[in-house]
Image (tube, rainbow, N blue to C red):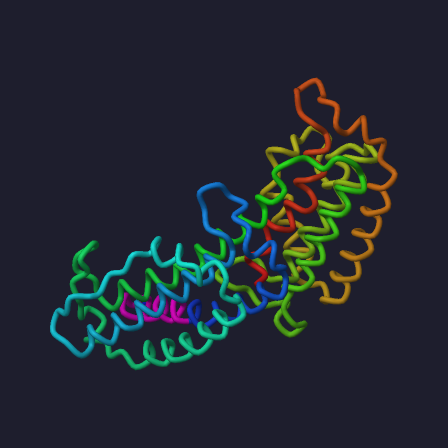
């Protein structure tokens, strides 16, 4: 494929990512409550609401910069105090739904703009007071990555609310239920369950993957079946060294399965996980083993932490 075709395909992918961002954020806002959205769970980092409001601030400024670059010769591009804007009262109190609506309109216009940029205009540029010369191509690349990076920050913020260990099986189950419900809310419609975004697994394969490791939790972590048996490895294989192969094999199996079969199995296994957790002898799971590890941590990484790990790619 000629380099120009590759560059066109890359730019189209970046435009598609910008087009998709408001829809991702709309689904996100349906999963968080006011306390989650306004609490800075990560020390020194922004809350979910501040991340969302910042995205609007940043992308409005970049849209204006794009217009200046195409209508003036090497214009000076306006800078703004990112942290100062986020610290304003409205960034802490404004409803996030309004910001999502703003981004939906803005990105509709911005995507239309990007589709009209001629080949000889991509290297038109302006001078930013802090970063120097910046081209239209730079703004597209940086803005597409910017949205994805803030989705990742929001995911880390949600994850950080669980800084302490659960105190009982019921507490563990409450966390599992909360993140399982969030996961269900961000799943796309059935028609998109086989669609791969950004080169990652399709939602169908990601659900099958989560089910594989919940099965591992049930049969190995809780019931004590050998790990190699659960993961269909040879007896002498070290599971920790075969994770990529195990995940790849599971993805290949799931690829040809109907969505209904993957979904039904996921809910069946998850229901068994919930029952098993309520039957745990809790002191055994919060007592350090011979390696100094807490067994409960393996339950955490296989359930609600694992759901959050895949959450961003499902939006």
Rendered view: 182 above or below 158: below
Report the residue at 58% width, 65% height from top.
Answer: 29
Q: Nearer the viewer, residue 9 or 171?
A: 171
Q: Secondary structure of the magenta portion, mostly?
A: helix
The quarter of the picture where residue 57 lies is bottom left
Report the residue at 65% width, 51% height from top.
Answer: 307
> In the image, residue 235 lies at what x, y percent?
73, 30
Report the residue at 76% width, 67% height from top.
Answer: 260
> In the image, residue 294 lies at what x, y percent?
69, 27
Q: Quadrant of the N terminus?
A: bottom left
Left or right of 1, for residue 76? left
Q: Is residue 3 magenta?
A: yes
Left or right of 219, for residue 90? left
| Residue that sits furthest to the front in the current view | 89
Left or right of 270, for residue 314? left
Q: Magenta segment, which residues?
A: 2-15
Q: Quadrant of the C terminus?
A: bottom right
> In the image, residue 61 lies at what x, y percent?
31, 68
Rendered view: 58 above or below 291: below
């Amino acid at each position: 494929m000629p380099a120009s075709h590759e560059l066109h395909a890359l730019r189209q992918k970046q435009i598609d990512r910008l087009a998709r961002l408001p829809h991702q954020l709309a689904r996100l806002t349906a999963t968080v409550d006011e306390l989650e959205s306004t609490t800075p769970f990560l020390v020194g980092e922004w809350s979910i609401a501040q991340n969302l409001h910042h995205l609007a601030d940043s992308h409005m400024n970049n849209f204006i910069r794009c217009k200046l670059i195409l209508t003036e010769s090497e214009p000076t591009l306006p800078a703004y105090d990112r942290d100062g804007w986020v610290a304003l009262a409205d960034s802490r109190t404004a409803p996030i739904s309004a910001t999502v609506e703003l981004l939906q309109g803005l990105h509709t216009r911005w995507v239309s703009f990007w589709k009209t940029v001629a080949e000889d205009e991509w290297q038109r540029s302006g001078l930013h007071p802090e970063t120097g010369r910046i081209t239209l191509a730079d703004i597209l690349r940086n803005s597409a990555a910017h949205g994805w990076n803030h989705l990742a920050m929001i995911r880390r913020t949600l994850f950080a609310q669980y800084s302490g260990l659960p105190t009982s099986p019921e507490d563990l189950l409450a966390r599992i239920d909360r993140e399982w419900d969030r996961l269900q809310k961000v799943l796309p419609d059935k028609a998109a369950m086989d669609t791969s975004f950004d080169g990652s697994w399709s939602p169908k394969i990601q659900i099958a993957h989560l089910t594989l490791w919940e099965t591992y939790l049930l049969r190995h972590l809780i019931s004590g079946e050998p790990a190699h048996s659960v993961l269909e490895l040879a007896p002498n294989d070290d599971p920790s060294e075969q994770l990529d192969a195990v995940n790849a094999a599971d993805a290949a199996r799931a690829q040809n399965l109907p969505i209904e079969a993957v979904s039904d199995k996921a809910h069946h296994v998850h229901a068994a996980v919930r029952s098993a957790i309520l039957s745990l002898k809790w002191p055994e799971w919060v007592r350090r083993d011979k390696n100094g590890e807490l067994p409960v941590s393996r339950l955490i990484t296989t359930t609600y932490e694992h759901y959050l790990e895949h959450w961003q790619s499902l939006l």
